């Protein structure tokens, strides 16, 4: 009885913290400065602690996972499956966003002053620069700056190094295991404070962006969230059922805590500890989840892709610009490619949106229309992003198990086939 209560307590604490934060935020709408000045710093401290532990968890868990595979070719097999899954679901996600935005005419009927809109877009790196910047020139700088793609590259190469070192690498493997366990314990301590963190994160958001402020752009929010929900319930349910051989109900039940925290924090990287725990309960082996999830937190942006599609159509309709079919195909390709290298931190979708708008000739000033509600949209798209990461881990795990079973069966049958 006590064990079950303890097991359920953190999820319920997060839920209660979320609800209380929303209620207090609504009560403080006329005093948002109080929420921002006195409550938000608590949430910032909690999010900082999450970010503090993320780099060692990502670095050590990927190295631990690669070492446990003991075969560089197997790492390549898992990596290819993961990247293909993420690319296909991201392309499908932006298509979902475009379809809903077009069918529901997300920008129709709006009369907003656009003459004074200003927005300074951050300069997006070129594809070649993004590719080159994946590989660090210093092994320590990416750990300090939390440049996640570079951290992943460091972990992969040093993981390979331990495997190739053979017996001489055993001590390094033991040290990595030890430090990984310490990092997971620290992670659990921080997760134990989740209800307070969620409360402090959500209160200022609601206080600063109350219903009255959201009303003019309510349709954008509703269309985006419709796309989010449809993608989660249809695409991920079908994936875990058909590819992963798992009940979608079980999948979403175990993912509920991760999804709640994702909604509150709007940080894919910050939710990584929750996702590692949830996928473990879903039967995903640690060596697979330790590789697939950190990679997904960096390059898998399904929710962000839906957001790109909805906002691009909204901005086009606000400015009275009609996007032809070829331009909408360009949006799909740009959003899919732009998701690679976009860090899993709050607000990362704005740079991607600037890239998408530029690709089809839409004015960047349109970003100012959605900048005010970006945080609200970011909360939902983060839920989609991290749920996609977990669904990929479940599917890759199932495919690897089938592959191993097939090889074992083939190996068992081979001697019999050669008997006289």
Image (cartoon, rainbow, N blue to C red):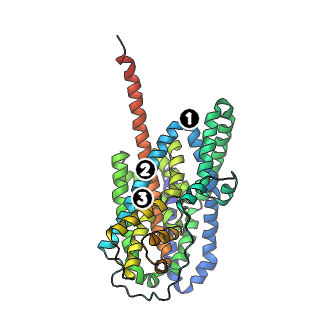
Of the numbered discs 3 and 2, the one sitting upstream in the chain is 2
> Mark 3 sits on what residue?
90
- At x 39% / y 37%, what residue is drawn? 402
Asked whether residue 194 appears in the rendered view, the answer is yes
Disc 2 secondary structure class:
helix
Asked whether residue 229 appears in the rendered view, the answer is no
Q: Which dot marks residue 346?
A: none
Q: Position of residue 23 (x, y in %)?
A: 49, 77
- At x 41% / y 24%, what residue is drawn? 411
In the image: residue 179, left or right of residue 372: right
Of the numbered discs 2 and 1, the one sitting upstream in the chain is 1
In the image: residue 166, left or right of residue 95: right
Q: Residue furthest top?
A: 420
Q: Which is nearer the eye, 115 or 278?
A: 115
Q: Which is nearer the eye, 190 or 120?
A: 120
> Mark 2 sits on what residue?
84
> Mark 1 sits on what residue?
70
């Amino acid at each position: 009885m006590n064990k079950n209560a303890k097991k359920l307590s953190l999820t319920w604490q997060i839920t209660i913290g979320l609800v209380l934060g929303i209620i207090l935020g609504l009560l403080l709408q006329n005093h948002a400065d109080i929420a921002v000045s006195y409550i938000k710093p608590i949430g910032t401290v909690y999010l900082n602690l999450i970010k503090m532990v993320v780099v060692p968890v990502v670095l050590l868990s990927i190295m631990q996972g690669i070492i446990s595979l003991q075969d560089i070719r197997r790492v390549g097999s898992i990596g290819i499956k993961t990247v293909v899954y993420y690319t296909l679901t991201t392309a499908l996600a932006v298509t979902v966003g475009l379809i809903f935005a077009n069918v529901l005419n997300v920008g129709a009927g709006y009369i907003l002053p656009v003459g004074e809109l200003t927005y300074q877009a951050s300069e997006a790196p070129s594809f070649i620069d993004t590719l080159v910047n994946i590989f660090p020139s210093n092994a320590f700088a990416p750990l300090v700056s939390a440049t996640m793609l570079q951290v992943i590259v460091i972990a992969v190469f040093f993981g390979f190094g331990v495997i190739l070192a053979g017996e001489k690498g055993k001590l390094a493997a033991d040290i990595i295991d030890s430090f990984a366990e310490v990092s997971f314990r620290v992670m659990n301590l921080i997760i134990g404070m989740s209800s307070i963190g969620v409360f402090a994160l959500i209160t200022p958001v609601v206080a600063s962006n109350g219903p009255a402020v959201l009303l003019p752009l309510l349709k954008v929010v509703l269309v985006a969230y419709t796309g989010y929900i449809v993608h989660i319930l249809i695409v991920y349910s079908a994936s875990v059922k058909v590819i992963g051989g798992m009940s979608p109900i079980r999948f979403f039940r175990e993912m509920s805590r991760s999804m709640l925290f994702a909604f509150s924090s709007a940080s894919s990287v910050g939710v990584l500890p929750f996702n590692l725990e949830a996928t473990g309960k879903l039967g995903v082996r640690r060596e697979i989840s330790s590789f697939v999830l950190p990679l997904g937190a960096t390059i898998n942006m399904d929710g962000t892709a839906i957001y790109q599609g909805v906002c691009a159509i909204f901005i086009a309709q606000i400015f009275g610009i009609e996007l032809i079919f070829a331009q909408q195909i360009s949006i799909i390709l740009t959003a899919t490619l732009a998701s690679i290298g976009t860090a899993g931190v709050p607000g990362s979708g704005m740079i991607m949106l600037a890239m998408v708008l530029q690709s089809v000739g839409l004015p960047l000033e349109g970003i100012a229309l959605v900048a005010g509600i970006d945080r609200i949209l970011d909360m939902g798209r983060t839920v989609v992003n991290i749920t996609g990461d977990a669904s990929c881990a479940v599917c890759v795990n199932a495919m690897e198990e089938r592959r191993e079973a097939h090889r074992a069966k083939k190996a068992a049958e081979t001697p019999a086939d050669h008997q006289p």
